[in-house]
Amino acid sequence: MIEFERVLEQGRAAQRQFQDLELVAVGGTAAAAHCRHRVSLDVDLVTPHLRDRYEEVAARLEDWEGWTTARRNPPVLILGQRGGVALGLRQRRRAQPLRTLEVSGLIMPTAAETLRVKAFLLTERRATRYYVDVAALTRLLGDSAALTALGYLNLVYPAAGSQSLVSRFAEACEVPPLDLAETPLQAYKCLKAPFTDWAYVAEACRRLSRALVKLELNNVLPQTLDAGFYNDSNR
């Protein structure tokens, strides 16, 4: 298995090489770096500039020593590898910039922001790894801070339809992941206890989501990105 430090180094190298793209390491790498509950085998990097500069960025990647392109999906995705580590450059999906800090020399979302991203992906994809990471980030932050962080979900991920993201997240946490049967937690990316126990993960996600949807039903979620959102840079 690829050493996690090698993964982090390739993420750092990409951020040094393409500083103008404002690359932020997200996905499993960010969750693993914050919580150290598992490893990650690749680095997903998001940028607000890929859509507008796709061909330029693709050409610069081709000129980067050691880079090999695996797949392109203009104008939002370029996948490749360098130094035996898979790297992905993606267009940032949301308009609101990510709250970031540096962990192990890598620029990534704060733990609170990483939790928001993971909650969004859990809702959209219902894959086991997102439930695991939500549970791990909740344990890291503590229930109260995790609930505060997710209180801003509807503001940073506006509803595409009539149902809010908070309510969709709560619904997703009440059912098993779509790939749970194919994802044995005891053998998943060096996952550590207690996250190898699905019952623990499921309960952590349900506890958080039920508290969150209760706040929504009582109409006490934040209505603006206030000081509570902007003061999470050290978490």
Image (tube, rainbow, N blue to C red):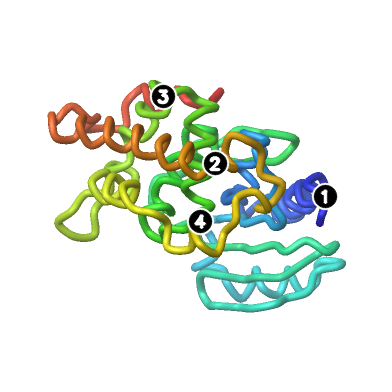
Give the crowd class for mark 4: few <14, some 14-19, many >=20 residues within 10 Å.
many
Give the crowd class for mark 1: few <14, some 14-19, many >=20 residues within 10 Å.
few
Does residue 100 appear left or right of residue 204 in this picture? right
CA gap, disc 2 and disc 1:
24 Å
Name the residue located 65 percent from the left edge and 49 percent from the top edge: 186
Q: Secondary structure at mark 2?
A: loop
Name which of mark 2 and mark 1 comes first in the sequence: 1
Under mark 1, the amino acid is Glu
Name which of mark 1 and mark 4 comes first in the sequence: 1
From the viewer's perspective, is residue 232 above or below residue 136? Answer: above
Residue labelled with disc 2: 197
Image disc number at residue 3: 1
Name the residue located 41 percent from the left edge and 24 percent from the top edge: 143
Q: Position of residue 61 (x, y in %)?
A: 73, 69
Under mark 2, the amino acid is Asp
Under mark 3, the amino acid is Asp
Name the residue located 72 percent from the left edge and 56 percent from the top edge: 41
From the viewer's perspective, is residue 66 above or below residue 103? Answer: below
Q: Secondary structure at mark 3?
A: helix
Image disc number at residue 143: 3
Image disc number at residue 48: 4
Does residue 134 appear left or right of residue 211 in this picture? right
Image disc number at residue 162: none
